[in-house]
Image (spheres, rainbow, N blue to C red):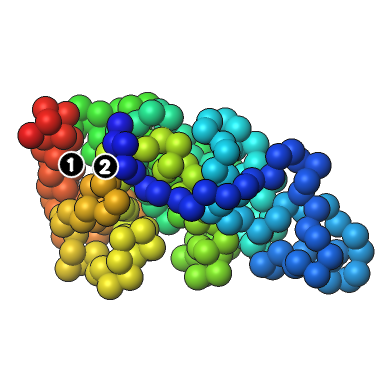
Amino acid sequence: MLSDGVKIEQRSLFDSLSDLRVPQGQASLFPPAEEKAGKAVEVPKPSRDNEWLGITDLGELRKHVVLCRSCPLRDGARGVVFGEGNPRADIMFIGEGPGRTEDETGRPFVGRAGQLLEYALKSIGLSRGEVFIANIVKCRPPDNRLPLPPEVQACLPHLRAQMRIINPKIVVLLGALSSQTLVNPSIRVTRDRGKWFTKEGVEYLVTFHPAAVLRDEANKKKEFMADMISLKEKRDKIQSGR
Ligand code: SF4
């Protein structure tokens, strides 16, 4: 594990679930309908990076995230898709947001795109259980649209907390949203796929989202699989200390 992974400013987090009331005058990013109507409601505070610093265990973090109502996506989703895999993984894969199958099952990348991801992992000798798979937002956007910027900002602290706890050496960015959000807004996947970026001691690989590969296999699958080989080479290099 890297010792200088993603750094997050250290402050407090809520100590218990009884501390989840939004203080008067401090509205959540997207107040629920009951709050707008003037009724007292118990909802989690908006997510902020510093709220999760005391949590060092993914299971504990999950308990907080599943209660999140910090953006409207939760209203249209069955539940929160937290992410899954090895909590001490050296490699994380990060997509955009849950689709219908993911929303139904509560698991990331389990539809056709997930099958392609598993196939790609297998091609370089990895399995789902060896890596950690997550998304930029944890609740399904309606009609499988991309998450909106306020939704991304609302949910990002959850992902940052996951990354801080897992402390991966390598993060594979599946598609434009994760690439632009976590590395650089100027990234264009068609131009930059296959490139590596180093940020705060973590190696980031930009590649296609598997769903995009499925939509255009003739042009994208070969490049996607080439990116997996690049991933394997990078992992081998890191493991051997070269
Ligand atoms: S998408 Fe993220 S920020 Fe929005 S409600 Fe779900 S967990 Fe909370």
Q: Amino acid at mark 1?
A: Leu
Q: Secondary structure at mark 1?
A: helix
Where residue 41 is drawn, which disc sits there? none
Q: Quadrant of residue 93?
A: top left
> Circle 2: is it few (<14), some (14-19), or many (20+) Cα within 10 Å?
many
Q: Is residue 38 above or below residue 22?
A: below
Q: Is residue 214 left or right of residue 76?
A: left
Q: Is the Cβ of the residue at disc 1 closer than 8 Å to that at disc 2?
A: yes
Q: Residue at x 31, y 60 (%)?
A: 183
Residue 160 on image: x %, y %: 46, 49
Q: Residue at x 72, y 52 (%)?
A: 44
Q: Residue at x 13, y 44 (%)?
A: 230
Image quadrant in which the N terminus is located: top left
Image quadrant in which the C terminus is located: top left
Residue 74 on image: x %, y %: 65, 55
What residue sits right under mark 2 in the picture? 170
Q: Is residue 28 above or below residue 140?
A: below
